Image (spheres, rainbow, N blue to C red):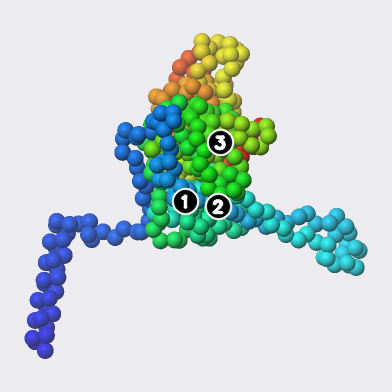
Amino acid sequence: MRKLWLLFAQSTTVALGVLFIIAMFKPDLLRWQPQVQSVTIQQAVPPAPGRAVSGESFAPAAQKVIPAVVNIFTQQKIRSPAHPALQDPVFRYFFGDRLDARPREASNLGSGVIVSSNGYILTNHHVVDAADEIQVALADGKTLPARVVGSDPETDLAVLKIDAGTLPTITFAQADSLQVGDWVLAVGNPFGVGQTVTAGIVSALGRTHLGINTFENFIQTDAAINPGNSGGALVDAAGHLVGVNSAIYSRTGGSQGIGFAIPVSIARQVMEQIVKSGSVTRGWVGVEIQDLTPELAESFNLKTVQGALIAGVLKGGPADAGGVRPGDILQAVNGKPVTDASSLLNLIAALKPGDNTQLTLERKQKSLTVTILVGRRPPQRSLAMNPEAELN
C-alpha cells in the first residue's frame, strides 16, 4: 500500500511540474476557446492582374471560375386568400372549409459563388428570401440541399451552407483593384438555361441613389446580366471575384447593357459577419436625413451643398441624447467628410455600437462638434425598388 501511495505521489508531482512548465512557456495551450464558424478565403496577390487587351481569350479565366459558381433553385409555398363566402358563418356551416385556401408552390432561380471549400456560398438575399426549400446544383451536375446561414436585406446578400466535402472555391480580388474600363466576366445561370459566361467592361464605379438597396455602392457593367444571374460572379480578366451580380436596369426585363454588382469589399465584410454571428451589426444614431439641394443650401445660407440635412431626430435616441437637432447640417463623422445622405448612411453604419463618435455639425452658420454613444441599427426592410430597376 505504501508503494502505491509513493507511486501516486510521484506521478502527481511530475504532472504538476509539466503543467507548471506549460503555464510558463506555452500558456495558450491551457486556455479553452469556444469553437466558432470560420470561412477560409482565397485572396489574390497584389497587384491583381485584372487587365486584358481586346481580342485576348478569356478562356483561362472562365475555366478558373466556372467550377466555383453554382445554380440555386428555391421553392416557396404560397397560400392563396380564402374564398370570400367563407366569411359567412351560415355558408361555413353547410359547406365547411372545402373552399378554404390551398397552398401553391412558387419557384425561383439564381446563382451563387462558392467562397470556402467547406461549403459556404455567397448569393443575393432576394434569391433565397422566404424560400421553404433550397437546392444547389454544382458545376459537375450534383444537386445538394442548402440552408441559409444568414442574410442581409440592406445589401441584398445572403450566405448558404452545403455539406459536400472539399469544394472548388473562387479567389477574391484585392479591394479597390477595379478601374473603369477593365474587362469583366459575368458568370451565372440566366433564364435557367445553364452555366453561362458573358463579357463586358466596367462602365462605372460607386453607383448610388438607385433605390435598389439601403446601402449602395454598385459596380456598373455592360456585361450581359439577365434574370437568373443574381448572386453569380463578376470576375476580372484573371478570374478573381470583383463583385456579386445583383440587378439590372431594364424596360424590357432583359439585358440592355446596364447591370449592377455588389463590390467584393462589401460582400466580404457582410459575409464574414454572417458566418461568424448569423447577422450583420451596424451603427445607428437615430436621425432622419436627406440630401442638400441647392435650394436648401440657399435657405440655410450655406456656401456649398456638401453634407446632409438632419430632417428629424428620434426622441430618446443616441443623436437626441448627444444634442443633435432637426435642421442641423451634418458635415463630418469622426473627421471623415460627409458628401451627401448616402455617404453619411455608410459612415454611420460602419461605426461600432457602444463606441463614442464625434459628429461635426453646422447650426445657424456656426460649427460645433457633439459626442454621441453609437447604438445598434435595428433590423430594416429592404427598400422598394426603382420601377425601372429589375432584380434578376
As measured in the structure, the alpha-carbon distance from the residue carrying label 3 to the one carrying label 1 is 23 Å
Q: Left or right: 34 with respect to 20?
A: right
Q: Earlier in the sequence, mark 1 or mark 2?
A: 2
Q: Is residue 36 above or below residue 373?
A: below
Q: Which residue is mark 3?
A: 224
As measured in the structure, the alpha-carbon distance from the residue carrying label 1 to the one carrying label 2 is 10 Å
- For the point 38% across and 33% down, the residue is 50
In x, y percent, where is residue 58? Answer: 43, 38
Regarding mark 2 in the picture, which secondary structure is present there? strand
- For the point 50% across and 51% down, the residue is 70
Regarding mark 1 in the picture, which secondary structure is present there? strand
The 10 Å Cα crowd at callout 2, few under 14, some 14 to 19, many 20 or more, is many
Which amino acid does the dot numbered 2 rest on? Ile
Q: What number is the disc on residue 72?
A: 2
Q: Left or right: 183 with respect to 96?
A: left
Q: Which residue is mark 1?
A: 121
Q: Note whether residue 250 is visible.
A: yes
Q: Nearer the viewer, residue 356 or 254?
A: 254
Q: Quadrant of the C terminus?
A: top right
Q: Nearer the viewer, residue 1 or 98?
A: 98
